[in-house]
Protein backbone atom coordinates (compact mmCIF):
# COMPACT_ATOMS: atom_id res chain seq x y z
CA UNK A 1 0.00 0.00 0.00
CA UNK A 2 2.90 2.36 0.73
CA UNK A 3 4.21 1.80 -2.79
CA UNK A 4 0.94 3.01 -4.30
CA UNK A 5 1.04 6.18 -2.23
CA UNK A 6 4.62 6.95 -3.28
CA UNK A 7 3.79 6.40 -6.94
CA UNK A 8 0.69 8.58 -6.72
CA UNK A 9 2.59 11.36 -4.94
CA UNK A 10 5.47 11.31 -7.41
CA UNK A 11 3.09 11.53 -10.37
CA UNK A 12 1.02 14.31 -8.80
CA UNK A 13 3.62 16.84 -9.90
CA UNK A 14 3.44 15.71 -13.57
CA UNK A 15 2.79 18.38 -16.22
CA UNK A 16 -0.77 18.94 -17.45
CA UNK A 17 -0.09 17.33 -20.83
CA UNK A 18 0.47 13.95 -19.17
CA UNK A 19 -3.21 13.17 -18.67
CA UNK A 20 -2.70 9.38 -18.96
CA UNK A 21 -0.55 9.50 -15.85
CA UNK A 22 -3.20 11.40 -13.91
CA UNK A 23 -5.96 9.11 -15.20
CA UNK A 24 -3.97 6.07 -14.11
CA UNK A 25 -3.42 7.60 -10.68
CA UNK A 26 -7.13 8.30 -10.35
CA UNK A 27 -8.07 4.75 -11.32
CA UNK A 28 -5.52 3.31 -8.88
CA UNK A 29 -6.82 5.54 -6.08
CA UNK A 30 -10.48 4.69 -6.76
CA UNK A 31 -9.77 0.96 -6.97
CA UNK A 32 -7.76 1.15 -3.73
CA UNK A 33 -10.57 2.99 -1.96
CA UNK A 34 -13.20 0.50 -3.14
CA UNK A 35 -10.93 -2.37 -2.16
CA UNK A 36 -10.47 -1.02 1.37
CA UNK A 37 -14.17 -0.28 1.88
CA UNK A 38 -15.37 -3.68 0.67
CA UNK A 39 -12.77 -6.13 1.91
CA UNK A 40 -12.57 -4.60 5.40
CA UNK A 41 -16.18 -5.38 6.41
CA UNK A 42 -16.17 -8.71 4.57
CA UNK A 43 -13.02 -9.77 6.39
CA UNK A 44 -14.57 -8.77 9.71
CA UNK A 45 -17.72 -10.80 9.03
CA UNK A 46 -15.71 -13.81 7.87
CA UNK A 47 -13.58 -13.71 11.01
CA UNK A 48 -16.69 -13.45 13.19
CA UNK A 49 -18.23 -16.49 11.49
CA UNK A 50 -15.05 -18.55 11.75
CA UNK A 51 -14.36 -17.65 15.37
CA UNK A 52 -18.04 -18.11 16.27
CA UNK A 53 -18.09 -21.59 14.78
CA UNK A 54 -14.83 -22.48 16.52
CA UNK A 55 -16.21 -21.23 19.85
CA UNK A 56 -19.46 -23.17 19.34
CA UNK A 57 -17.61 -26.39 18.52
CA UNK A 58 -15.27 -25.99 21.49
CA UNK A 59 -18.20 -25.12 23.77
CA UNK A 60 -20.18 -28.16 22.66
CA UNK A 61 -17.14 -30.37 23.15
CA UNK A 62 -16.59 -28.95 26.63
CA UNK A 63 -20.26 -29.54 27.50
CA UNK A 64 -20.10 -33.17 26.38
CA UNK A 65 -16.87 -33.78 28.30
CA UNK A 66 -18.28 -32.08 31.41
CA UNK A 67 -21.38 -34.28 31.17
CA UNK A 68 -19.28 -37.43 30.91
CA UNK A 69 -17.17 -36.26 33.86
CA UNK A 70 -20.28 -35.54 35.93
CA UNK A 71 -21.73 -38.99 35.21
CA UNK A 72 -18.42 -40.67 36.09
CA UNK A 73 -18.10 -38.71 39.33
CA UNK A 74 -21.69 -39.38 40.39
CA UNK A 75 -21.38 -43.11 39.72
CA UNK A 76 -18.29 -43.46 41.92
CA UNK A 77 -19.83 -41.67 44.89
CA UNK A 78 -20.02 -44.12 47.82
CA UNK A 79 -23.40 -45.76 48.43
CA UNK A 80 -24.70 -44.90 44.96
CA UNK A 81 -23.02 -47.23 42.48
CA UNK A 82 -25.92 -47.24 39.99
CA UNK A 83 -25.55 -45.23 36.83
CA UNK A 84 -29.25 -44.36 36.65
CA UNK A 85 -28.82 -42.03 39.61
CA UNK A 86 -26.24 -40.08 37.62
CA UNK A 87 -28.55 -39.93 34.61
CA UNK A 88 -31.43 -38.63 36.73
CA UNK A 89 -29.25 -36.02 38.45
CA UNK A 90 -27.74 -34.76 35.23
CA UNK A 91 -31.10 -34.82 33.47
CA UNK A 92 -32.57 -32.76 36.28
CA UNK A 93 -29.76 -30.19 35.98
CA UNK A 94 -30.20 -29.91 32.20
CA UNK A 95 -33.99 -29.71 32.52
CA UNK A 96 -33.83 -26.88 35.05
CA UNK A 97 -31.26 -25.04 32.92
CA UNK A 98 -33.41 -25.51 29.80
CA UNK A 99 -36.56 -24.30 31.53
CA UNK A 100 -34.70 -21.23 32.80
CA UNK A 101 -33.40 -20.40 29.31
CA UNK A 102 -36.82 -21.05 27.75
CA UNK A 103 -38.43 -18.70 30.25
CA UNK A 104 -35.83 -16.01 29.47
CA UNK A 105 -36.38 -16.44 25.70
CA UNK A 106 -40.17 -16.15 25.89
CA UNK A 107 -40.26 -13.36 28.47
CA UNK A 108 -41.95 -10.16 27.38
CA UNK A 109 -39.56 -7.22 27.16
CA UNK A 110 -39.75 -4.81 30.06
CA UNK A 111 -41.08 -1.36 29.29
CA UNK A 112 -40.05 1.59 31.38
Image (tube, rainbow, N blue to C red):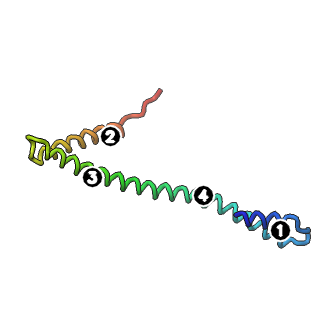
Q: Reading the chain from its start, which is encountered first: label 2 or label 4?
A: 4
| Real-space Cα separation, disc 2 to disc 3, in angstroms | 21 Å
Q: What residue does disc 1 label?
A: 22
The residue that appears at 50% across and 57% down in the rendered structure is 47
Q: Which mark is residue 65?
A: 3
| Real-space Cα separation, disc 3 to disc 4, in angstroms | 37 Å
Q: Which mark is residue 1?
A: none
Residue toward you, 106 or 45: 45
Q: What residue does disc 2 label?
A: 101
The residue that appears at 35% across and 38% down in the rendered structure is 106
Vertical placement of residue 16 versus 53, above or below: below
- In-image side of 68 versus 82 (left or right): right
| Real-space Cα separation, disc 1 to disc 4, in angstroms | 27 Å
Tell which tag, 2 or 3, sits nearer the viewer.
3
Kind of element beneath mark 2:
helix
Q: Reading the chain from its start, which is encountered first: label 2 or label 1?
A: 1
| Label 3 Cα crowd, 10 Å radius (few <14 / some 14-19 / many 20+) | few
x and y, in percent, of residue 80 in the image: 9, 42
| Real-space Cα separation, disc 2 to disc 1, in angstroms | 62 Å
Q: Are marks 2 and 4 in contact (CB under 8 Å)?
A: no
Q: Reading the chain from its start, which is encountered first: label 3 or label 4?
A: 4
Q: Which mark is residue 40?
A: 4
Quadrant of res 31: bottom right
Q: Are marks 1 and 4 in contact (CB under 8 Å)?
A: no
Q: Reading the chain from its start, which is encountered first: label 3 or label 1?
A: 1
Vertical placement of residue 84 versus 13, above or below: above
The residue that appears at 83% across and 71% down in the rendered structure is 21
Amino acid sequence: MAERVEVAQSRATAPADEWPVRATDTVIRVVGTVHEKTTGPITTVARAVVYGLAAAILGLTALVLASVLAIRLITIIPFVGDVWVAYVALGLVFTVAGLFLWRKANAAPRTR
